[in-house]
Image: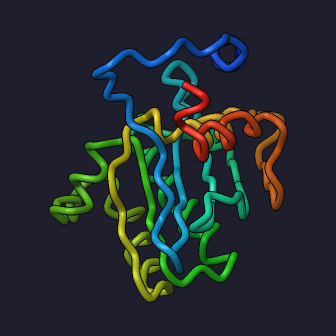
Amino acid sequence: MVQWSVDTAYDLWQISQAKKATKPGDTRQTWKTPPTGWYKCNVDAAFYADAGQGATGAALRGSAGNFIAGRARWYPHGIDALMMETLACRDGMVLARDNSVERLQLETDCQELAVLWSRKTYKRSYLAAIFRDIEEISVNFIDFSLMYANRSCNRVAHMLAKQVTEDIRLGEWHSAPTCIDLLLTEDCNPVTHR
């Protein structure tokens, strides 16, 4: 619980600090809207190794960058960060399915997970059951892709994952909560908010 508080305080401090002007050659990646007719779900996880607990966050957005829905879930048991990131992917897909999405781009900032998915090398992994869930859920979509995105493109999902705790185990939003307002604005207007 203490680590979560420290992480949340640090994140809020970062958001409150004035952004410095981007230097020439700065290659900071920015969030990109999905193509017309598609939705994008960014997912992220937090893992607290001392307690073996964690949380997932998912933010579903339309092709104009508009917030559609968000969800965060607390998990009282977890093995490691990779497991939590995999659960975040599954949770994001369920969120998209629950919102009748047909074409989904799922983005995670866990490169290892994206590689496992693309190479289909998870069959004998301790994550195999979660990946099977992901495969089964993916058939609900006309088109589906799971890809890696830099952490700077995933700040909204990261913030949503921090909204749940051992005491508040589920968070659901159909309009953007205030904790992500600035992040959404910055994602959709990256030049003016660096």
- Residue 56 in view: no
- Between 111 and 85, the one nearer to me in the picture: 111
Q: Residue at x 61, y 63 (%)?
A: 64
Name the side, left or right, on which 181 lies relative to 124: right
Count of labels in the image: 0
Judge whether 28 appears above or below 98 on screen. Answer: above
Q: Position of residue 13 (x, y in %)?
A: 69, 11
Judge whether 98 appears above or below 51 on screen. Answer: below
Q: Residue at x 42, y 49 (%)?
A: 108
Quadrant hosting residue 53: top right
Name the side, left or right, on which 86 lies relative to 18: left
Q: Position of residue 95 (x, y in %)?
A: 64, 67
Q: Residue at x 38, y 29 (%)?
A: 28
Quadrant hosting residue 110: top left
Q: In this figure, which colouring scheme has been used for the structure?
A: rainbow
- Between 187 and 101, the one nearer to me in the picture: 187
Q: Residue at x 59, y 69 (%)?
A: 94
Q: Position of residue 156 (x, y in %)?
A: 62, 41
Q: Position of residue 131 (x, y in %)?
A: 36, 64
- Residue 49 in view: yes
Query: On the rendered image, what quadrant is the N terminus found in?
Result: top right
Judge whether 94 appears above or below 126 on screen. Answer: below
Name the side, left or right, on which 185 lies relative to 50: right
- Between 92 and 30, the one nearer to me in the picture: 30
Query: On the rendered image, what quadrant is the C terminus found in?
Result: top right
- Between 145 and 61, the one nearer to me in the picture: 61
